[in-house]
Image (cartoon, rainbow, N blue to C red):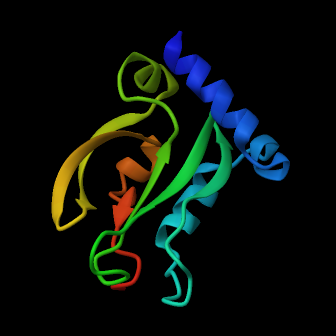
Amino acid sequence: MRIAALGVLALSLMPAFAATDAVSDAVLVARATAVMSVKQAPADRMLGVHKGAPVIVDVRCATDCPRLTVRIIRYIIEPGAVCIRLGGDTATITVPVSLQERPQTFCIPHALYQRKLHVDHPYQK
């Protein structure tokens, strides 16, 4: 229930246009393959709702931005039972943190996970 409550809280904090917009697998794939302009500051962006759960483009950067930026497209729910029920996949991704990198686990939309599009280095394409 705690995870569900976090999802509801996340939905309430998202802009109105994103909170109600349903996104398809095709929209997720298109966003995952888009090249980010180096002029764009790394920032998280809400994509909308996919299969009933909010999806975020999570941009992580530490000491060498934008070169070492990592973009993760994920659900805003914890990995585990809720993620599995949603049809999501659990992925452990190495993300930059200060001068180091460390693994973190996320719930990923299956449409991206199966194509290995859930994480990339958007400025290095």
> In the rendered image of this protein, does residue 64 appear above or below residue 105?
below
> In the rendered image of this protein, does residue 94 appear above or below residue 21?
below
Residue extending farthest top: 1
Give the tally of numbered discs.
Answer: 0
Q: Where in the figure is residue 39, as x and y percent of width and height?
A: 55, 90
Return the residue nearer the eye: 20 or 11: 11
Name the quadrant containing residue 61. Answer: bottom left
> In the rendered image of this protein, does residue 41 appear above or below residue 29?
below
Residue 45 can be seen in this image: yes
Residue extending farthest right: 16
Residue 120 horizontal side relative to residue 11, left or right? left
Residue 52 can be seen in this image: no
Q: Where in the figure is residue 26, as x and y percent of width and height?
A: 60, 58
Q: Could you tell me which quadrant the C terminus lies in?
A: bottom left
Q: Where in the figure is residue 49, as x and y percent of width and height?
A: 68, 41
- Image point 51% across, 81% down: which residue? 36
- Image point 49% across, 65% down: which residue? 32
- Image point 33% across, 85% down: which residue? 124
- Image point 35% across, 49% down: which residue? 114
Q: Where in the figure is residue 102, as x and y percent of width and height?
A: 17, 52
Return the residue nearer the eye: 48 or 117: 48
Residue 121 horizontal side relative to residue 101, left or right? right
Return the residue nearer the eye: 38 or 32: 38
